[in-house]
Amino acid sequence: MEYQNPQSAPGLETALPGALRATGRTVISEAAVAKVAGIAARAVPGVYSLGTGQSRALGAIRDAVGSSDHAVGVRAEVGETQVAVDIDLVALYGTPLHPLADQIRAAVYAAVEELVGLQVIEVNIEIHDVFVPGPPKLPAAVEARPVREALQ
């Protein structure tokens, strides 16, 4: 779906000569909205990663070759003036999940409404897993090797 802005920007009619009036349409794709929402969601502390197991595996491969997809785990449905966003994520262990979801919603609402200019009607969040970090790795101990005596 696409969003079209039928109005021209305020003040531009008088600032531009007759032939250069601000007319036309603006199309905002679902991919663009999903990317904005994904970046906003990742910025919330307590979000380990976005996406389900399969999409995270593909994301790890993508990261290994130096590419990234900020919209992984995010779907957006764009209407004429409104948008709905669905987010799949993995939370970091120790983060309270309901407050995390509320913080993500607030961040996505603010980012999409400010940057895209569409009204967000809902942000649905599905927490698929909780990441539990392993114990910190200790520096590798130097192996004690037997000292060989020099042959004389």
Image (cartoon, rainbow, N blue to C red):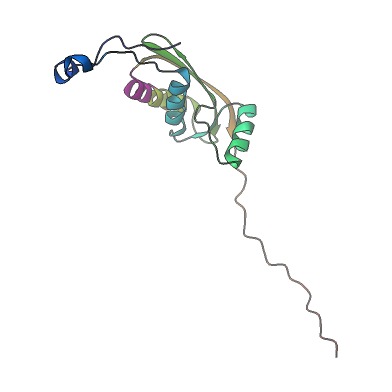
Residue furthest to the left: 14
Residue 43, given in percent of the width and then of the height, sits at 43, 34
- Magenta extent: 109-117
**Residue closest to the eye, 138 or 15:** 15
**Which residue occupies the extreme bottom position in the image?**
152
Residue 109 in the image: x percent, y percent? 37, 21
Q: Which of the pair 12/48 is nearer the observer?
A: 12
Judge left or right: residue 32 versus residue 63. left
Q: Is residue 112 visible?
A: yes
x and y percentages locating residue 65 in the rendered image: 60, 41
**Rendering quarter of residue 80:** top left
Residue 21 visible to an observer of this rendering: no
At horizontal 33% and vertical 18% (from top left) the residue drawn is 117
Q: At 19% across and 18% down in the image, what residue appears?
A: 12
Q: Is residue 75 above or below residue 95?
A: above
View extreme (right): residue: 152
Nearer the observer, 48 or 76: 76
Q: Is residue 113 magenta?
A: yes
Q: Quadrant of residue 89?
A: top right
* Quadrant of residue 88 within the rendered picture: top right
Image coordinates of residue 63 in percent, x first then y, are 57, 39
